[in-house]
Image (cartoon, grey):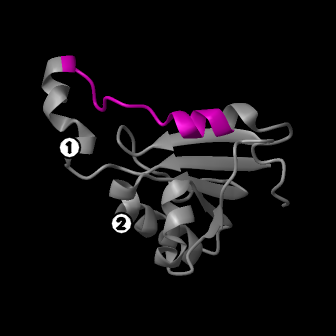
Amino acid sequence: MKVYLINPRFQPTIWSFEGLQPLTGTCFSTTPLGLATVAALTPEPWEVEIADENVEEIDFDKDADLIALSAFNVQYHRALEIISEFKSAARKSLWAGLTIVFFRKRSKGNAISACGRGRGGLAGISS
């Protein structure tokens, strides 16, 4: 089983830290630690790949059994675009994190929402 974890691109806001990039020589100054944590907690036989759209393009043709996404409030619009595109291709998608938990109706039916404390990672998701 393969899962593709996605961190959506931040729009130019205070949260994107674009003003710091010339000073630090980086593409983006934060890492998607939530997704890294989920990846670390994911048991065998799942294979995990993380895509951070702030530093690389998302592969919408990725061979994966599950597409999983987490987003901050400021990433909401881009997250909705991403999850909608995968859903339109009939891909099993999971949108997790506080944004979707607090604003479940805003997902417009485009995702399963989930909340938890990382217990077991993806172990509770059936194929």
Mark 2 vs 1, N-terminal side: 1
Screen quadrant of the C terminus: bottom right
Q: Nearer the viewer, residue 47 or 38?
A: 38
Q: Residue at x 85, y 37 (%)?
A: 44
Instruction: Say above or below: 120 vs 97.
Output: above
* Span of residues in magenta: 24-38
Give the distance between the C-alpha atoms of the residues marked 2 and 1, in whole angstroms: 16 Å
**Secondary structure category for the residue under label 1:** helix
Q: What amino acid is labelled 1 in the image?
A: Ile
Query: Residue 9 appears at what percent x and percent y?
Result: 35, 49
Q: Nearer the viewer, residue 95 or 6?
A: 95
Residue designated by label 2? 77
Q: Is 69 on the left or on the right of 37, as rendered?
A: left
Q: Residue at x 69, y 57 (%)?
A: 66
Residue designated by label 1? 14
Counting other residues with Cα less than 10 Å from the Cα at mark 1, is it few (<14), some (14-19), or many (20 or more)?
A: few
Q: What amino acid is labelled 2 in the image?
A: His
